[in-house]
Amino acid sequence: MISKKAFTFILGVATLACAATRPVSAHHSFSAEFDENKCGELTGKLVGVDWQNPHPYFFVEGKNSKGETARMTFQTSSIANMTRGGTPRAYFMENMNKTVIVRACASINGTDNRFAASWVRLPDQPIHRTGQDVERIFGSNN
């Protein structure tokens, strides 16, 4: 028969082992990474997309907020939100190397040319939502 002390020890080790195998949740708020007071429209050529969880990214070459030519990185909402909202990966692939206009908010951690995208569109085309509506352009912050 196992002693109470040994049982407690084994149970503790088993609990720690289970806890160590659980994925760590590291999701963040918008304001932890981006400044909702530093938003604007940026224009350039769509040059890439990285369709990954938890946030897809797309890349645009053009003039950044300082007026310098740069490759800009735009973080989006989740893949599920993008797809449900009518902006699937195919939208980016079909418009690769075309001029796009992006409404986005700048990074607050000092990373140049990194933004959270609210929407993207081709000139004279409808807006495709890509992220949170922190400016309440669409009437909500969803």
Image (spheres, rainbow, N blue to C red):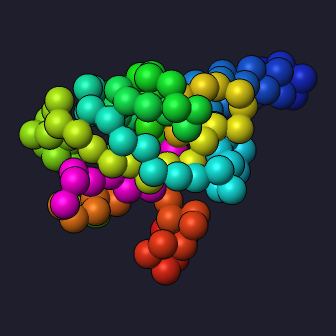
Q: Quadrant of residue 73?
A: top left
Q: Position of residue 95 (x, y in %)?
A: 14, 40
- Let me know if residue 29 appears in the view: no
Q: Nearer the viewer, residue 68 or 52?
A: 68
- Let me know if residue 103 appears in the view: yes
**Rendered position, 76 above or below 62:** below
Q: Position of residue 113 (x, y in %)?
A: 53, 28
Residue that extends furthest to the bottom in the rendered view of this protein: 139
Q: Is residue 123 magenta?
A: yes
Q: Quadrant of the N terminus?
A: top right
Measuring 58% from the left and 32% from the top, which residue is drawn there? 66
Taking the image as shown, residue 127 lies to the left or right of residue 40, namely: left
Measuring 38% from the left and 34% from the top, which residue is drawn there? 57
Q: Nearer the viewer, residue 71 or 1?
A: 71
Taking the image as shown, residue 64 lies to the left or right of residue 28, namely: left
Magenta region = 116-124
Taking the image as shown, residue 108 lies to the left or right of residue 140, namely: right
Measuring 69% from the left and 56% from the top, which residue is drawn there? 37
Q: Nearer the viewer, residue 26 or 101?
A: 101
Q: Nearer the viewer, residue 81 or 115?
A: 115
**Overall secondary structure of the magenta section:** strand
Taking the image as shown, residue 112 lies to the left or right of residue 46, namely: right
Residue that extends furthest to the left in the rendered view of this protein: 94
